[in-house]
Amino acid sequence: MENGEGREVRWGFGENISLTSAGKNSIRATLYKVMSSLKEGDPRPVIPLGHGDPSTFPCFRTTLVAEDAIVDAVRSAKYNCYSPNVGVPSAKYAIAEYLSRDLPYKLSPDDIFLTGGCSQAIEVVISVLARPGANILLPRPGFPAYEARTAFDGLEARHFDLIPEKGWEIDLEAVKALADENTAAMVIINPNNPCGNVFTYQHLAEVAETARELGIMVIADEVYDHLTFGNNPFIPMGVFGETVPVLTLGSISKRWLVPGWRLGWIATTDPKGFFKKTMFLDSMKNFLNISTDPATFIQGAIPHIIQNTKEDFFNKIIHILREAADICYNKIKDISYITCPHKPEGSMFVMVKLNVACLEDIHDDIDFCSKLAKEESVILCPGSVLGLKNWLRITFAIDPSSLEDGLDRIKSFCQRHSKSSK
């Protein structure tokens, strides 16, 4: 392009390879690709078993306490202002109290940094850890946002496996083999997305001891905290803060079923004060100084939401998830060529293995999901985007009747594409 003087103008909008790659490989982009295969004219409803947002289903509506708290915060006119960069003090205090319920020590508001959902918490932490030559240890399968931020910020991602035969426990020997003097941290997700497992106290203690030996911190993604319905209760990684410094990432998105409200946090669960001896906290504050804040009125509603939500609400959601997990696990047993190695005990997901070799005209998990969408109007998340090719992630946080319908359609699809039926 030339300007008025005939000279070429170079705008400088070059393609950012890291950002482009990360965006194309996100869950959102992958699900959009799968949904683009939906066939027009199918009279049946689309069954969304690919995402982690149950809020559209009436049985997963948030509590009236939360809705009323938002209305009251808006009408008070106290929260029409900009937010402090690290969060409204009353919200920080309420979250510190909330997290301290499960810890052997008490957090203070200074330990809490509010973010725009857990996604921004991931962005903040990864960006602050980034430095030339650094690497970070990530679980496989895992949540792609970590890979995306790691790639964008120039860290090297090194993957350790979760072992399906051991209930998706972390391969700690692999963690030890991967770490070196440039390793910044390891990430764990508990309760787990995408596998649906819940780590035991003993396993988390082993994780803490391994991290201590390696001299690295643990980033504990606990966005599904307390959403457990199996034999293992939720144990926060911060319980082991005396052993290893822990950054806990969380939000109200899942437990309160309001992912669109975008209120998350980073908590420094670090009773020995490791972070205070470094520039890490200052770096997080500096990052938050130049980034966007959660909506102030949402922050203003947090104390009321946390303090006044009754256990009956949480118990109802756990009951629905337990029932849905049972339906999912039992119906998968009847679907040929799909295997579930471990019954889900937490979060909203289960990972299943796909036997592509026994299916006609199905090349891989992405092809399976695309053709399933076209023929049966059912959306699944391909395992490839989560780090496991020819696996599938199934979301069971939808109403039970729709879940059964969706799984029946998957069964019909597999029967129709079975090589043995040709």
Image (cartoon, rainbow, N blue to C red):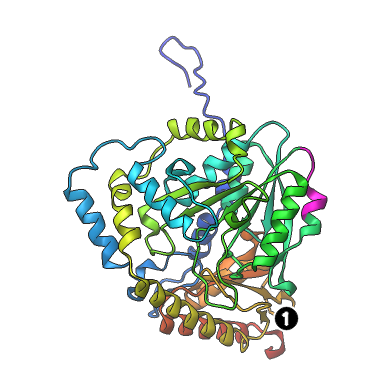
Residue in the picture at 30% in, 68% down = 63
SS type, badge 1: helix
In the image shown, does 219 or 98 lie closer to the viewer? 98
Residue in the picture at 56% in, 30% down = 14
Residue in the picture at 67% in, 80% down = 339
Name which residue type carries label 1: Cys
Report the side of 335 relative to 160 (left or right).
Answer: left
Across and down, in percent, residue 380 comes to 54, 70
Across and down, in percent, residue 347 comes to 52, 68
Residue in the picture at 63% in, 46% down = 245
Across and down, in percent, residue 328 comes to 54, 82
Residue lying at the far top in this picture: please name it.
5
Magenta residue span: 175-181
In the image shown, does 272 or 223 lie closer to the viewer? 272
Residue 170 included in the magenta stretch of the image? no
* Residue linked to disc 1: 358
Answer yes or no: is residue 290 visible: no
